[in-house]
Image: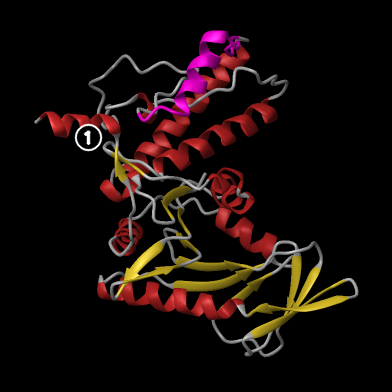
Amino acid sequence: MAQLIKLQDYVSRYETDLYRYPSQFVRLKKQQWEKMKQHWENGDLPKPSPAVEELVEDEKNSMKDKLFSLFKKKEDENEEETIPQPSDEDLYLDMDAGQDIHSEEELKASFLNLVFDFQLRWASSTITEKSYVDNSYHYDERLRYLLQRFPDNIFVMYNPVLKIKNAPVELETVLITPTGIWCLTFLEFEEGTAYIGSGERFWVKKWGDREEKVLNPLIGLKRMERIVHQIIRYAGVELPIYQAVISRNGYIDYPLSPVGIQFLDKRIHHEWFQQQRSSSSPIKSVQLKAAQAIMEYCQTTSFKRLQWEEAASDE
């Protein structure tokens, strides 16, 4: 699974220590999958109980974010590279006790959904702070596609808000890979839609016997590439930057398209997607440096966790 290092303007674990959390995520995910699979093979997945249901309901209104899980905390507290432990959420994945899992494929799907929710927590909280998360992100198919189908060595910035010259600028999707940075914009509406590209402010969108205009996606894409390029160049990072318009369910026709922009429509998206998935390169220092450079420009809106506010008031 790709790693969600920044979501909109939410506070992120990764911005507190970008050089530590990526390896922690990979390690934790592997450990939790092995435990979950073992429990399933042994037939001892948790059963729902009134006590658990009541506690999970209470969690929705609790600022302490206590999470309940299939997995117990590791006994070796002194193991190297463990995550700080002010709350249980760092080491626990919630297992839906009401699930009825019949195959390993269903188990994998369930696990991916658990990790997705786990990533949203990491992308909206730190040890001392939290951000209010728009509920729509929990059901965002595009975000799930990016996180659940791409490998661990890819960092995802999804709708990050950057502060450029004291003004907030929201980008679309930035993938930071070991070998390059992808600035992506999505152009996806009805299945089978055809888009006629041009240098004008609007493109033509056609499906069935209907036709209408949509905003030229290259406007935002070029701005995003320009901002990312300036940031990494200033930081002295040497990574190529790629630009692409993705339409997984449609077709893009742009005969005189600009040089340097890829149109990943329904005909060729899968080939590009497989190339990204097949990359076995480990996370690289230049990749971390690029992510760190962009992160430093990101805007963050958050509030102190209740227990930390109480601690500060007692001092």
Q: Is residue 17 visible?
A: no
Identify the residue shown where x is 52% and y is 27%.
33
Count of labels shown?
1
The quarter of the displayed image where residue 28 is located: top left
Quick one: which residue is furthest to the right in this view? 209
The quadrant in which the C terminus is found is top left
Residue 45 magenta-highlighted:
yes
Instruction: Indicate the position of residue 162 as horizontal and vertical percent values.
Output: 36, 66
Q: Is residue 139 above or below residue 69?
A: below
Viewer-nearest residue: 228 or 169:
169
Q: Quadrant of residue 24?
A: top left
Q: Residue at x 71, y 88 (%)?
A: 255
Residue 310 on the magenta span: no
Q: Quadrant of residue 43?
A: top right
Q: Residue at x 52, y 76 (%)?
A: 220
Dot 1 surroundings within 10 Å: few (below 14), some, or many (20 or more)? few
**Where residue 205 sits in the image (x, y, percent)?**
76, 76
179 to the left or right of 303: right
Q: Is residue 87 left or right of residue 96?
A: left
Q: Depth check: 36 or 60 in front?
A: 60
Vertical placement of 297 versus 113: above or below?
below
Residue where numbered disc 1 is placed: 309
The residue drawn where x is 56% and y is 86% is 259
- Residue 32 visible in the displayed image: yes
Identify the amino acid type marked 1: Glu
Indicate the position of residue 211 as horizontal and vertical percent values.
82, 78
Of residue 309 and residue 187, the one placed in the foreground of this image is 309
95 lies above or below 277 = above
Is residue 242 found left or right of 126 in the rendered image?
right
Q: Which residues are magenta?
A: 44-63
